[in-house]
Image (cartoon, rainbow, N blue to C red):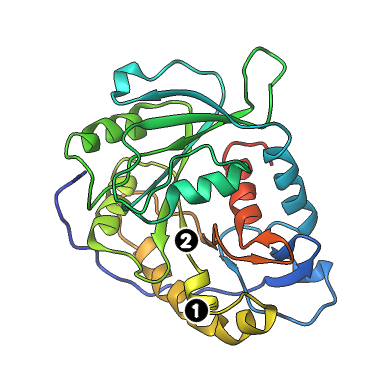
Amino acid sequence: MSLIPASRLQKFSINVRRVYTTTTTAHGFTASDPSESSETSKPQLAYYWDTVAPTPLQLQQAEKFFLAAPPKLLYSATKFRSVNNSTIPEVAFLGRSNVGKSSLLNALMGQKICHTSSKPGRTRSMNFFAVGGEDGVGSPGRLAVLDMPGYGKGSREEWGPEIMKYLIGRKQLRRAFLLVDALHGLKRSDEEILSLFRQNAISHQIILSKVDRILFPKSTPSLARMERNSPALNRICEEMKDKIQPGRSDGPEALGEIITCSSEAKLEGKKLGVNGVRWAVLAATSWA
């Protein structure tokens, strides 16, 4: 599935001031303001340079919001014209086939509601899920999360135009989250979509998936291994900053934060970075 013609993205340097560290809480490794913790600085799991990192309490609140009620499949649509009207804010999750999108959404919503498969192209429609419980005015959810068809291997050419119609024309859309495999980084197709986001002023943010492959390669997750392998993840994020905020004049750039996560690995009973993704969704939809 191709969304736009290939284009070259010029790379510019960007200076980033790291002011946030991770702290160990009852909810695992989360990002927090250092003024709220006297703990020694630990490896970062998420990068914030244009925004304010959530506190441990905010991450706990985000988890509570998503787990307040079971998610509900509102409907599925293969054409933009068949997308239902809605009064609740929406966020869309996109990524290459097999980037772990559906697995992350299952972790995000706390239930296996999205189809997952090792075969590329499993998601074949735009699937809308209501989360957060009823809003008190007749809606089954307080916001909607969209699982979009993947692009690349196993995708279909006709999916691209319909997805773009939604991203450009949907008034309820608050942010598009682009998943990137931490091990493989940004591919040409990802950079093309980032360019398209900028050209059409679509609010967007990057999520690095499958970071357990970087932090715990072929080993059991532990805080010690996370600290030992975090420099490799740091380098990946540093290199990606220039690409998601290239300094071009072709439109608004990605939000200045990179969330890293894993739908598989757990530390202290919590899946890595999932509460950070939850908080980002609440911030995008003004529930934070």
**Residue 76 at x, y = what percent?**
40, 25
Q: Amino acid at mark 2?
A: Ser
Q: CA distance from mark 2 to mark 1?
A: 16 Å
In the image, residue 144 above or below residue 214: above
* Residue drawn where x is 70% and y is 31% of the image: 69
**Residue 190 at x, y = what percent?**
30, 56
In the image, residue 226 above or below residue 57: below
The kind of secondary structure element at disc 2 is strand
| Residue placed under numbered mark 1 in the picture | 218
Mark 2 closeness class: few <14, some 14–19, many ≥20 residues within 10 Å: many
Quarter assignment of residue 133: top right
Q: Tag 1 or tag 2, which sits nearer the N-term? A: 2
In the image, residue 185 above or below residue 158: below
| Residue placed under numbered mark 2 in the picture | 209
Residue at the outermost left position: 5
In the image, residue 222 above or below residue 45: below
* Residue drawn where x is 67% and y is 39% of the image: 66
Whether residue 245 is visible, yes or no, is no
Q: Quadrant of the C terminus?
A: top right
